[in-house]
């Protein structure tokens, strides 16, 4: 399963990109904590997910993502990744399927917000 995705933006746009990514994560139902260069987004209940596994309602399933920005020259890279794998394993194949679907939705939301704002650049591009 894919657990990391990178988005390239111009260095001058990295703050705007982080704000847009945070807004996209909020709109996907996550609590967002931002620090310079990092966003941590969580949703659901870790305890319920560990106790009930796949029996917990999908809206209450625990999920945690981290978005980190790194800069090299005129290009910055935003890296979105799962920050915690433990509780999803408890749900077995049902939990894994839910996790994959949620990952797709979250990564599409972040990419869509960056693309709509015109902030994405092609890998290796200027």
Image (cartoon, rainbow, N blue to C red):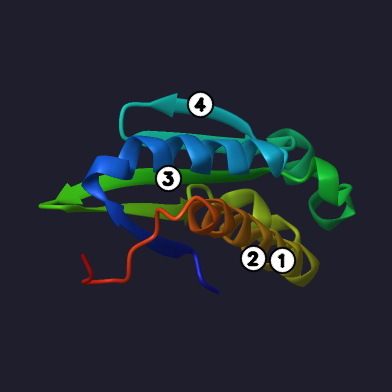
From the viewer's perspective, is 12 left or right of 87? left
Image height check: is 26 above or below 86? above
Tag 3, which secondary structure? Answer: strand
Q: Which residue is mark 3?
A: 67
Q: CA distance from mark 1 to mark 3?
A: 18 Å
Tell me what residue is drawn at x 66 percent, y 56 percent.
88
Is there a contact, CB below 8 Å, between mark 4 and mark 2?
no
C-alpha distance separating marks 4 and 2: 21 Å
Sequence-wise, the earlier of marks 4 and 2 is: 4
Q: Quadrant of residue 41?
A: top right
Decide: marks 1, 2 in contact (CB < 8 A)? yes
Asked if residue 20 lies left or right of residue 89, the reply is left
Sooner in the amino-acid sequence: mark 1 or mark 3: 3
What's the residue at 23%, 70% (across, down)?
125
* Disc number for residue 101: 1
Disc 1 crowd rating (10 Å Cα; few below 14, some 14-19, many 20+) is few
């Amino acid at each position: 399963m894919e657990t990391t995705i990178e988005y390239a933006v111009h260095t001058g746009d990295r703050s705007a990109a982080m704000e847009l990514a945070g807004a996209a994560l909020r709109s996907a139902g996550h609590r967002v904590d931002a620090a310079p260069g990092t966003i941590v987004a969580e949703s659901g209940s870790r305890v319920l997910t560990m106790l009930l596994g796949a029996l917990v309602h999908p809206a209450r399933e625990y999920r945690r993502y981290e978005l980190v920005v790194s800069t090299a020259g005129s290009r910055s890279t935003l890296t979105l990744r799962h920050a915690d794998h433990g509780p999803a394993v408890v749900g077995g194949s049902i939990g894994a399927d839910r996790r994959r679907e949620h990952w797709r939705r979250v990564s599409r939301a972040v990419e869509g917000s960056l693309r709509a704002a015109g902030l994405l650049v092609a890998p290796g591009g200027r």
